Image: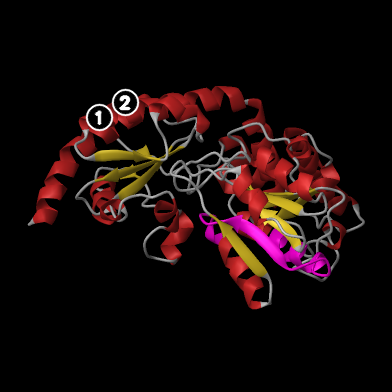
Amino acid sequence: MECYLDNAATTQALPEVCDLVVEVMGKDYGNPSSLHMKGVEGERFVRRASEQIAKTLRCKPKEIVFTSGGTESNNMALIGAAAANRRRGRHIITTCFEHPSVLEPLIYLEELGYEVTYLPVDKEGHVKPEVLRDALRQDTILVSVMMVNNEVGSLLDVAALSETVKAYNPEIVFHSDAIQAYGKMKISPGKMGIDLLSVSGHKIHGPKGTGFLYKAEKVRLHPLIRGGGQQGGLRSGTENVPGIAGLGLAAESMDRTLDERRTHMYERKRQFIRRLEEVPGAVVNACSPLSLEQTAPHILSVSFAGVRSEVLLHALEERQIYVSSGSACSSNHPGISGTLRAIGVPDDLLEATLRFSFSGFTKPEEIDHTIESLRELVPVLARYRRR
């Protein structure tokens, strides 16, 4: 039995999304900037996707900027907002366990003379509003806090954190990386006080190489890509019309089925945690059964005492069970997870942790097969390592 439990890394595109992408590529292939009818047809798909996505966020279609994915959205938000507001100050605040697509642009900004404060998180992966309040300064121009941690599934209260920021200074730009949150929870950036919000298409059963940045109308950004002036000059270059059309359809589908899928994923997560009692030495990180629904429905981090995560990952792979040892993007930066250190995972478990991530399509029998495999493999691999 094939068990795909790595949905936080990527998801399988919906069949209707695949059909639409192929149709647009082969039939409605006009450049959306062209003035003839072929171009108008292409522009309709872009406009339609903007409307579909805006409806899911309760925002205006013109507040959606299409990108190549979550990494570009985060870079556009952080570097663009920092450049646009540099005359007001050069201080930025984030958390210590953000995704590399947030941390790396901030390191780049530090090289340009900006100062970044990295807030600590507790063992559940939460940031206390008072900790953020104490870090705010007169020269703070930007705060970036992820909505869901991509490795352990911590659900951060960005609405409360944004409220803290705006009470101190409403001109401070508040950005949230919602790449693991969008499509798994209701998000209303206007009500939540979010100025910039990043999303990736392939995390919501859409095409790879697609994403968007929600940009509140009032927020100023300096563009990273200049040229033809597409998308109001914020992101030049001919739009990826097939990908954008597929992204819009995926977003619409995720919104329509949100409640049903959330319930389903929490059921699979609860099933997994309950059955983990059968696996010796298994420890769940940043989530307890009592606080399960205070975490993301689709991500579960588990440490297995005495077993190297990479060895266990490949042992599971031999049984067609596909999981991750952390963020997929972290594979390009091998080493100990900063997230696991940040939440206080003991040293002996840092290299013994796997991430299991579910979707609305994950079957109960996939969970059962995975647990049965872990029950067999973990004791054997632990003995082997001790030798």
Q: Give the residue displayed 28% in from the left and 35% down from the top.
A: 370
Q: Amino acid at mark 1?
A: Glu
Q: Which residue is mark 1?
A: 277
Q: Give the residue displayed 56% in from the left and 37% down from the top.
A: 14
Q: Does dot 2 land on a helix, a strand or a loop? A: helix
- Location of residue 128 (image quadrant): top right
The quarter of the rendered structure image containing the C terminus is: bottom left
Give residue 274's mark.
2
- Location of residue 204 (image quadrant): top right
Number of other residues with Cα within 10 Å of mark 1, as a class: few under 14, some 14 to 19, many 20 or more: few
Question: Vertically, is 335 above or below 28?
Answer: below
Q: Amino acid at mark 2?
A: Arg
Q: Is residue 258 left or right of residue 239?
A: left
Q: Give the residue displayed 23% in from the left and 49% down from the top.
A: 315
Stretch of the chain drawn in magenta: 75-101
Question: Vertically, is 284 above or below 384?
Answer: above
Question: Vertically, is 85 above or below 356?
Answer: below
Q: Is residue 180 left or right of residue 191?
A: left
